Amino acid sequence: MDEKKGCHTDGCLVSIIIPVFNEREYLEPCVRSVLNQTYQNIEVILVDDGSTDGTSHDCDEIKKVDKRIQVIHKKNEGLSAARLSGMEQAQGQWMMFVDDDDIVLCDAVESLLFFAANEKIDIIAGGRIDTKTPEKTVCTYCPKKGYDSMERNGPDICSLICTDAQQTVITPMWGKLYRTSFLKQANVTKFRDICPTIFFEDVLMTPLLYWQAKRIVIVKSPFYIHREVPTSISRSGKLSRFYYEQVDAGRILLKFYSRNHMENMYVYELGIYINSILRIYCLIGRGQDNQVEGCDWTKISWKIKNYFQIYRKQYWKYSVDRLPKKLCFLLFGAFPETWRRMARIYYRITKGGK
């Protein structure tokens, strides 16, 4: 690789994994942004996760455009399993995940690789831009010396998540380069039996990966353009395994932070967890929303009430929520059904009757 372009990794291969599911409208712009990287020694792995809208055919057609593209067709198992399938196929020394409706700026790979010379570095994370129209973002090639960055050990970066109001330490799986040897040794399937849908998503995995990394570089300039889609799983408000599994995923993280004496992260996660499980409890019981394959919503309701009792004293002690909100949450512990009815009324009023 040309030294003046800032890559000191001898032209190493970078594997870019794109899980794909029913995104015909956005897939081609996404793949084009990857193929148009200023750093060309890449392989692109499209993992078709059982698409049903013709996207499977589109993947095969896109493959014909560039010999660097390969396609994996598999049954639908969710984003985590799709990422894992791509990771198992990857041959590059470095790996990047890209969602099928997002785009990456033209110099993303080259710019992040600039920091890869240190063999102790396991993760290189770039900044992000959230927008409803990623296509309008223009790639402007910049000298690498102008990028603001910081390098720290993994646990230190993990500890910064709770203070990251500006999203400098981005937590999604995408927008980063991972050293392949690190990622394949990180036991990313450890919690697959407990959280089969989200075991390899940021809601659970990013803090655990940060903790395990020897060194991490955070590049504060944005290279990844994330499309904000109101109907996405995390924004729709419709119950799914994605939500149900957070009941267990949150406990995994709380135990992890407690075991490693990360009090700030524990308090941060505790607030997120209580808000999350009560939101899920509020949604449970709305007819068709209970019908999630493989989920026993009665059992999940019991879990939520039980876990709330386990953590309620700590929530009262540590939470920075205002007193009215704390009292509202404590009402849940005593009268969960009354709380749910009140929460639904509040939700309908604040959402304009929807």
Image: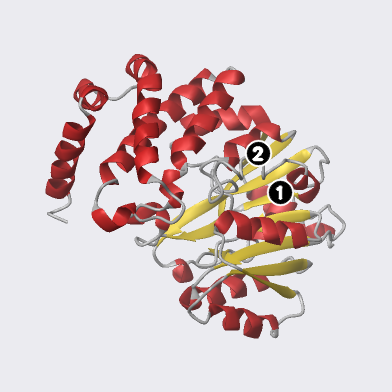
| Residue underneath mark 1 | 178
26 lies above or below 333: below
Give percent across and percent down for residue 141. Answer: 62, 63
x 61%, y 32%: residue? 157
**Element under disc 2:** helix
Q: Which mark is residue 274?
A: none
x 45%, y 41%: residue? 246
Amino acid on which disc 2 is placed = Leu
Q: Looking at the rendering, in which quadrant would you find the N terminus?
A: bottom right
What distance separates the C-alpha of mark 2 from that of mark 1?
10 Å
Question: Toward which corner of the image does residue 99 lie, by quadrant?
Answer: bottom right
Q: Nearer the viewer, residue 245 or 227?
A: 245
The crowd level at tag 2 (other Cα within 10 Å; few <14, some 14-19, many 20+) is many
Amino acid on which disc 1 is placed = Tyr
| Residue underneath mark 2 | 209
131 lies above or below 24: above
Q: Nearer the viewer, mark 2 or mark 1?
A: 2
**Label 2–label 1 contact, CB within 8 A:** yes
130 lies above or below 315: below
Give percent across and percent down for residue 347. Answer: 18, 45
x 49%, y 78%: residue? 24
Of labels 2 and 1, earlier in sequence is 1
Q: Looking at the rendering, in which quadrant would you find the C terminus?
A: bottom left
